Amino acid sequence: MIHRHKMPKNLHVAPRFDIWHEKYEPWSHLKRMGKLVGTGFYIPPEWYNQFRMFPPIHGNYKEEQTLNPHNRSEPTQDGHLASSEERRNLRDELSRKSRSVAAEGMRYYNLFWMRKPLDEMERQYYQCIRDGLTHDAAIKTVLRRFYETLSVKKRISAIQSEEAKLSGQFITMREAATVLGVLSQLQSEQLTPQQAATLATSQRRRVHEGGIYVASVEQREKLPTPAPTVPSSESTVASATDQATAPPATAEVAAAPKVDEGTMTAEVLMLQLEDDADHVMKIQPQKGDTLASLREKSTDGTAEMDWFAQAHDDASRANISVRSPNPKPKQ
């Protein structure tokens, strides 16, 4: 009886090889015992637990079943006999001269019918030798052509990525990782879509419209009043003189509030209000990034986008002015 549904899909691709040993392979044992144990009515033997902990190595099947074209056991399929020692040395030298050449086609590692840059460079090398170039000149010419084509590829990919960014329809992998982190956080916090939309809207508004600092009015902490002491006449006169000569301060900087140990907090500025002695104004940096704070950070507080170039020019001019116009020749 022939089970057509049991036949593999790729039978017509290659001839059937000798597979008499397949039913004795450890993977076959593991699969069949796994099906039996999966029913729940069979306690597996000890070798099954051992294989569950330490599975058999990958590639316990015969080499004809892999995609590796280099098969030493099949002389009719061995393509290594056609490549001479000279060709293997040439490919090895090209790979050692440039690591980019060796790594350029490796995303198609098992697809041996794909044309690799190394194959193209080998063909160009023999063409250069046929044209009368020496070995070193041919190697240099081939490598220069490769890097010219590689620079064109890199430039094209850079242009395409920039166009993708400007189109607004694509994001980078870094942004995608951030988005996935946010989504996993929302999922772990079990927020409804309405709550997530509200949070996103407020966050976007804070980033685009928020300033660098945030000011808030809080109630002043009541300090314990000291016990009244009877001042002497001299100290009374001195304090009255100081109060008369002191300038009228509109805002008084108070000490920063105590923070928990182990937390890094930015400096907080406390200003006393003129008309209200019970409340103070607290000014602290905005939490998170806003466009204003990022713009100030990128301009280094100078409001000039090319501040680094200007500073570099000033430094170079200073170095030029410091040097003597006619340096003495070395003895």
Image (cartoon, rainbow, N blue to C red):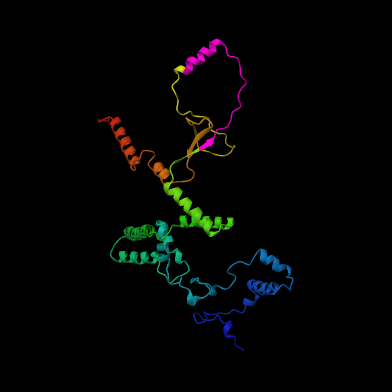
In magenta stretch: residue 234: yes
The residues colored magenta run 217-243
Q: Nearer the viewer, residue 249 or 171?
A: 249
Q: Quadrant of residue 138?
A: bottom left
Q: Position of residue 323 (x, y in %)?
A: 29, 31
Residue under the image location 55 percent in, 10 percent down = 233
In this orientation, does residue 331 appear? Answer: no
Q: Quadrant of the C terminus?
A: top left
Establish if 286 lies above or below 124: above
Q: Nearer the viewer, residue 107 or 307?
A: 307
Establish if 27 lies above or below 219: below
Q: Is residue 234 left or right of residue 113?
A: right
Q: Quadrant of the N terminus?
A: bottom right
Residue under the image location 58 percent in, 55 percent down = 189
Residue under the image location 35 percent in, 67 percent down = 123
Q: Quadrant of residue 117?
A: bottom left
Q: Position of residue 232 (x, y in %)?
A: 57, 11
Residue under the image location 45 percent in, 64 percent down = 107
Q: Is residue 228 left or right of residue 244?
A: right
Establish if 280 lies above or below 208: above
Q: Position of residue 108 (x, y in %)?
A: 45, 67
Q: Nearer the viewer, residue 119 or 300?
A: 300
